[in-house]
């Protein structure tokens, strides 16, 4: 069989996404995703140092695994992904030493 077109997914379901890396720390469980410099095309504000992460700068994106205790409430529309933030890698690693 040739390598032409792909078949649609069985049952119309999208493929399973790969599991997200989770880091556990004193401040909770976090999904952490590294971003390469090539994939960084806009500026972000780092919550650790309040400085700009310039386009082209490698950094991490992190968000809590659970938005808050009420995640199981059916009327809760806030997702933990809504809380994602872009951090300088060094600021992310040092966040437990702040304050």
Image (cartoon, rainbow, N blue to C red):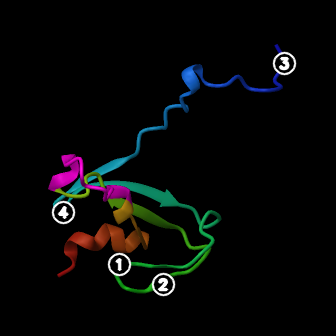
Gap between marks 1 and 4 measured at Cα: 15 Å
* Element on which disc 3 rests: loop
Mark 1, residues whose alpha carbon is within 10 Å: few (<14), some, or many (≥20)?
A: some
Gap between marks 3 and 2 measured at Cα: 48 Å
Gap between marks 1 and 2 measured at Cα: 9 Å
Which of 91/81 is in front?
81
Query: For the residues carrying marks 3 and 2, which lies nearer the camera in this image?
Result: 3
* Element on which disc 4 rests: loop
Mark 2, residues whose alpha carbon is within 10 Å: few (<14), some, or many (≥20)?
A: some
Q: Where is residue 42 in the image (x, y as percent from the top left)?
A: 59, 75
Q: Which of disc 4 and disc 1 is earlier in sequence?
A: 4
75 magenta-colored: yes
- Is 21 situated above or below 2? below
Q: Name the residue under label 1.
A: 47
User: In the orientation shown, which residue stands out farthest toward the front?
Assistant: 75
Stretch of the chain drawn in magenta: 69-81
Gap between marks 4 and 3 measured at Cα: 51 Å
Q: Name the residue under label 3.
A: 2
Q: Residue at x 37, y 85 (%)?
A: 50
Query: Contact, CB < 8 Å: mark 1 with mark 2?
Result: no
Is 32 left, or right, of 43 in this rendering? Answer: left
Question: Quadrant of the rendered structure where residue 32 is?
Answer: bottom left
Which of 54/13 is in front?
13
Q: Residue at x 17, y 54 (%)?
A: 70
Is 95 left, or right, of 5 in this rendering? Answer: left
Q: Name the residue under label 4.
A: 27
Which of 36/45 is in front?
45
User: In the orientation shown, which residue stands out farthest toward the bottom?
Assistant: 51
Q: Name the residue under label 2.
A: 52
Q: Which of disc 2 and disc 1 is earlier in sequence?
A: 1
Q: Position of residue 63 (x, y in %)?
A: 34, 60
Image quadrant in which the C terminus is located: bottom left
């Amino acid at each position: 069989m040739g390598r032409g077109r792909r078949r649609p997914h069985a049952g119309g379901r999208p493929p399973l996404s790969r599991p997200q890396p989770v880091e556990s720390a004193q401040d909770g469980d976090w999904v952490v995703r590294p971003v390469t410099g090539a994939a960084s095309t806009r500026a972000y504000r780092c919550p650790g140092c309040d400085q700009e992460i310039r386009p082209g700068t490698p950094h991490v994106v992190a968000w809590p695994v659970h938005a808050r205790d009420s995640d199981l409430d059916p009327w809760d529309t806030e997702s933990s992904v809504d809380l994602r933030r872009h951090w300088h890698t060094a600021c992310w690693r040092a966040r437990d030493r702040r304050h």
